[in-house]
Image (cartoon, rainbow, N blue to C red):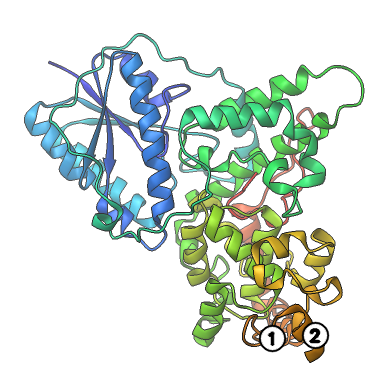
Amino acid sequence: MTYSVVWFKRDLRLEDHAALHQAVRRGPVLCLYVIEPSLWRQPDAANLHYQFILECLADLAEDLRQRGGALHVATGEVVEVLGRLYRQAPFTALHSHEETGNDLSYRRDRAVARWCREQGVAWHEVPQFGVVRRLADRDGWQAAWEKRMAAPRLPLPAAHFLPPPWAEGPPPPPSALGLEAVDAPLRQAGGRRRGLAVLDSFLDDRSGRYRGGLSSPLSAPTACSRLSPYLAQGALSVREVVQATRDRLAGLPDGPDPRRQGLAAFLSRLHWHCHFIQKLESEPPLEWRNLHPGYDGLREGEWNEAHFQALVAGRTGWPLVDACVAMLRETGWINFRMRAMLVSVAAYPLWLHWRPVGLWLARQFLDYEPGIHWSQMQMQSGTTGMNTTRVYNPLKQARDHDPQGRFVRRWLPALRRVPDSWLFEPWRMPADVQARCGVRVGRDIPIPLVDLEGATRAAKARVHGLRAQPAVRAVVPALVDRHGSRKPAPSRPRPRPAPRGQLSLDL
């Protein structure tokens, strides 16, 4: 019997699934997901990602069951699993979405391509969203994105689904994949059904608070769309979210409605979602190498392990920073401005290289998206050479976005009795105030690792000094030409400027 294999990767849905739609029109289909030990042993993988994906797979399997199909979830390296399938019952075609992932996923895909050529299996890869493979230049990217987002969503036609070719046991436990057992206890749950519910609640109500609420860690948990983890694993497609948002925006009644501005701003961020992933697609080494080579050596030789461990433990001594780490540990999420602040603090006053910090944050962010993540890590660390230096003062951010200290007190219980006047700089508290509120600086709460103002000033001077060098400046035009955004045609609405600090595009 002639049949095709549909290989699900970070596209865990049936609706608007181009690879599946293409395959079922050719004949019988086997639906496959592979739990790959090598990928889960990478330093950017974490148990919270694994558990979220298992929840997505449960929804996907149920959706297939309702259509008379089944999902074959196999454990092993993809080439090995495909080889076993082929030996048991040769298939003629492999269908999947293109993936812009980490370096190992790229090398894995190249190995799959070699295997398909050797077996005479046609591998059909189709775009997942607005990223253009083998993009010649950025000039036509905006038009390509708009064309893809405007194309009709793909329904799933009647299909002949094949049963799993062999019985698989339950998914391996985290420890078998080299993952720590810890999970973020308050994280969002995975699955398409939950993603659709989150989308509906945002479009119906929460979008009205989006523009004014996405910057503060107090309001952002409900004001932000919270769709990013569902987009990262493909439980929802970017196109269906874009179109649903446009439909809701067009259907709003005449007159003032705060949702109008919120939905328009959200659409802009969906555009930037693909814009940043395109950078990694076009320049895979930016995952581990400075985008601008002139910044090589800036921080690499001055790694401070004590600074890094204090950051990871939430013991920097700056309350808003440490509260963000605490929230991230529990929920797998913090809002865009707090993400940017964390990286800014790591890169400037703590003078840490972006790569190890980025790996740690990748394991913390439930919505880790490699293309966005590594582009933004470098932007916030000042190593792209083509972006404005972005430095966030954690004391100013606390006063601006948590003026009553509610966020800090929630996530740092030791500070709950500290008076407002000392809350954001508790190391300055006199001894008698420390005694009254039951907090001893240096024991219950840490003293800051460095002098914030002085260390930040010195770090900025080093980055700006390097940036001003003629040899460094000379490289910038080529980087802008390769990776910079373009002005759209006059008939097309222009997206808003790239958001400041949208690490992983939390949306």
Tag shown at residue 441: 1
Tag shown at residue 167: none
Q: Is residue 5 left or right of residue 262?
A: left
Image vertical order of residue 144 relative to residue 28, above or below: below
Image vertical order of residue 411 relative to residue 173, above or below: below
Q: Is mark 2 on a helix, strand or loop?
A: loop
Question: Which part of the image, by quadrant, shows the N terminus?
Answer: top left
Q: Is residue 455 left or right of residue 28?
A: right
- Label 2 belongs to which residue? 429
Question: Which residue type carries mark 1?
Answer: Val
| Few, some or many residues within 10 Å of mark 1 (<14, 14–19, 20+) | some
The quadrant where residue 436 appears = bottom right
Res. 393 visible in picture: no
Residue at horizontal 71%, vertical 85%?
455
Depth order, front residue of 54/96: 54
The quadrant where residue 257 appears = top right
Depth order, front residue of 470/343: 343
Res. 298 visible in picture: yes
Question: Which residue type carries mark 2?
Answer: Met
